[in-house]
Amino acid sequence: MNETKSIAFIGLGVMGGPMAGHLARAGHRVTAYNRSTKRAQDWAQAWAKDGLKLDFADSPKDAASGAEIVMICVGNDADLAAVTTGENGVLKSLANGALLVDHTTTSADMARQLAEVCSSKSIDFVDAPVSGGQAGAENGQLAIMCGGDEAAMNRAEPVMQAYAKSIVHVGPSGAGQTAKMANQMCIAGVLGGLSEAVRLAQGAGLDLEKTYQAISGGAAQSWQMDNRWATMTADTFDFGFAIDWMRKDLGYALDEAKRLGLSSPITAMVDQFYADVQAQGGSRHDTSALITRLAKASETPPSS
């Protein structure tokens, strides 16, 4: 087992909750903070069933006091700013020489700005957004893409291994977030094509299971096809990563592409398709609910 660390974990959502539990299971001393007390209590009960006990703090500042490492997994740029540089943020108490690892998906600018603040306080920083969804977090099989310097990565990687399938140091601060943007652009594009393929198979009256078997063994195969073909055909869309969050991520990607002078028409189009699903009441459905924008053969097609 890796050396035991004193860790503060900020943010116990569907991703952060399991990640904090894996750290405790690996033998680390974990103090957690979550904005919702009820969510923290629910996680405490879940961990207790596995024989795990985590301490809880009343604020990010209190959680970080005395910690060697702070790990964060919250919602967006504003949430991250609140729990780091805010009045009760972790940087109000985190000691010089500590390490801050941010698993939130944010803008690259936010990552670069936070890296500068940490550097001014002699705190190592890694932006480390994750991919793999709720199942990946629960099973400790997340893909982590990281930005930061080599020294910070060498400190962060052994700890992140508690919930990682793969860890890749992409480049300097902000590079992890930019890689995550590329990740989300790929997912959005694949789901756009997959949605139309499912509807084509349904409209043609094909056997959907046999169609999946026929096309998943070739070049069309993807994680989304393997894991969402059956659920999309069953109109089941409750798999953790909500459309609201995907639109947030795609917004960061489109902003970064614009900053770089790049065109991203497919991402922009799928982002607007997701806006249509939100307008239909599907904001909290998972990203495969993109297919609901496309009418079934027996229905009137939506207006373009």
Image (tube, helix red, strand yellow):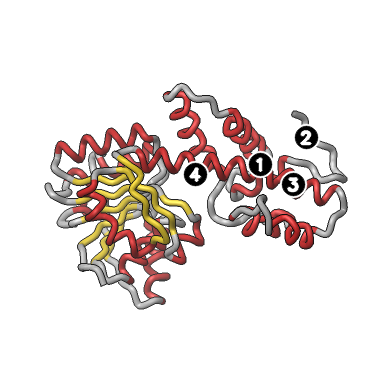
Q: Which residue is mark 1?
A: 192
Q: Residue at x 24, y 44 (%)?
A: 149
Q: Secondary structure at mark 1?
A: helix
* Camera-side mark, 2 or 3: 3
Specify the amino acid type for callout 1.
Gly
Q: Which residue is mark 4?
A: 183
Callout 1: 10 Å neighbours few (<14), some, many (20+)?
Answer: many
Q: CA distance from mark 2 to mark 4?
A: 29 Å
> Mark 2 or mark 3, which has the lower sequence index?
3
2 or 4: mark nearer the eye: 4
Residue 71, horizontal then vertical, whole percent? 29, 53
Which mark is first along the chain, 1 or 3? 1
* Image quadrant assignment for residue 48: bottom left
Choose the circle earlier in sequence order: 2 or 1. 1
Residue 287 % position (x, y)? 60, 47
| Badge 3 element | helix
* Mark 2 / mark 4, whichever is N-terminal: 4
The residues tagged by marks 4 and 1 sit, at their Cα atoms, a distance apart of 14 Å
Tell me residue 78's x, y (percent). 37, 37
Are discs 2 and 4 less than 8 Å apart at CB?
Answer: no
Return the mark for residue 302: 2
Tell me which numbered mark, 4 or 3, is placed earlier along the sequence: 4
Residue 230, compared with residue 105, is above or below; it is below
Q: Is residue 262 left or right of residue 104?
A: right
Q: Which residue is mark 3?
A: 197
Which residue occupies 23% across, 54% down? 154
For the point 62% across and 35% down, the residue is 270
What numbered label is drawn on residue 25?
none
